[in-house]
Amino acid sequence: MTNSRSRTHNPHLQELPHYQALLDGTDWASLATPCGTGESLPTALARLLNPDPVVRSAATDDALRKVTHQNTIYEATVPVALYVAAILNHPAIAADDFGHDADTPPHRPTLVRLLEWLSATAHDADDECVAFGERHYGDGFLNEYGEMRAFRDLRPAIFSAVHPLLGHDNTDVRAAALVAAVPLAEHPGLTTYRAELVDHARRLLTTSTDRHNRDRVLDAMKAWGHDTSDLENADDIAARERYARLMAERTSWTGGYSEDPPF
C-alpha cells in the first residue's frame, strides 16, 4: 500500500494514496473479511466509479456489505476505508444527482452513502469502543485488535478527504460529512479541528430533525466539554430519557451488567 505524505499546511493531515494505487497495490486475497477473504473486493470497488448511478448503487451495496458485519473492523476494512475516502471527490461520485422529482422517492447519492459508511466504521473504532475493550479485555486490547488500531492510525488521512465536504452545496452531504468527521476528529492530531466541527454542529442542530445525526453531534459536543442545553429540543430530551430508561432496564435484566459490546 502506498505510503501517505504529510500535507505541508498541516502536519497532522495526510494525503491519501490514489484510489487506483490502492486498488492495484493491495493484496486483497490475503485480507480477512466476515465471510472469507477480500479476493472479490477489487471488482466490487472499481464498480463504485461506474458512470451509471444504478450500477453504482448496486456496487455500493455489494462492496461495503463484504466488509460490514456486527460492528467489527476486519483486515479488509482498512484498505476499503482508504479507497472509499480516496474516491469521495471522484467525478463519477461528484456528478451524482443530489435532487429528486416530487413524484419520485428521494435518491440517496453515492457520496452520502459512502460518507455514512465511513461514519459508521469510524464510530465502531472510536474512543468509547476502545475504552469498552480495555475495561473488559485489558489494557492490551488495541495491541490484540490490530485491525482497529490500523484504522485509528489512518484517521487523519480519511479526515483529509471528508473535511472539504463540510462545505458542500447539498445539505445531506454536509450533514453526512460532519457525522463522519466527528469520530475521526478524536485522533490526537486532529483536535484543532474540533472548534470548526462544533460550529458546523451548531448549524446542523438549528435545522436538522434527523435523530441519528443530532445524537451523534450532541454526544460529541458533550464529550468535548460544550454545554448543549441551549441546542437541545424536546425530542432530544425525550430520546435521552428513553435511552436512560433502556439502560436501566438492561441493568435490572442482567443483574448489573448494562453494556453491550460495541463491536
Image: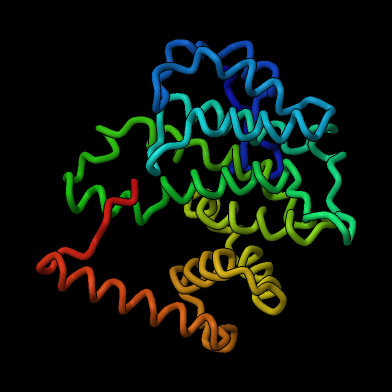
Give the x, y percent position of residue 171.
Answer: 77, 61
Give the x, y percent position of residue 251.
Answer: 18, 70
Q: Quadrant of the C terminus?
A: top left
Residue at the farthest left position: 255
Give the x, y percent position of residue 98.
Answer: 83, 51
Is 198 located above or below residue 55 in the figure?
A: below
Q: Nearer the viewer, residue 235 or 7?
A: 235
Is 224 located above or below residue 32 in the figure?
A: below
Residue 106 visible in the snapshot: yes
Instruction: Give the image's coloring scheme.
Output: rainbow
User: Quarter of the image holding residue 12?
Assistant: top right
Q: Quadrant of the N terminus?
A: top right
User: Quarter of the image holding residue 100?
Assistant: bottom right
Residue occupying image coordinates x 46% and y 78%:
239
* Numbered-mark total: 0
Give the x, y percent position of residue 119.
Answer: 55, 49
Residue occupying image coordinates x 27% and y 56%:
260
Residue occupying image coordinates x 24% and y 40%:
141
Horizontally, residue 110 falls left or right of residue 117, namely: right
Residue 15 visible in the snapshot: no
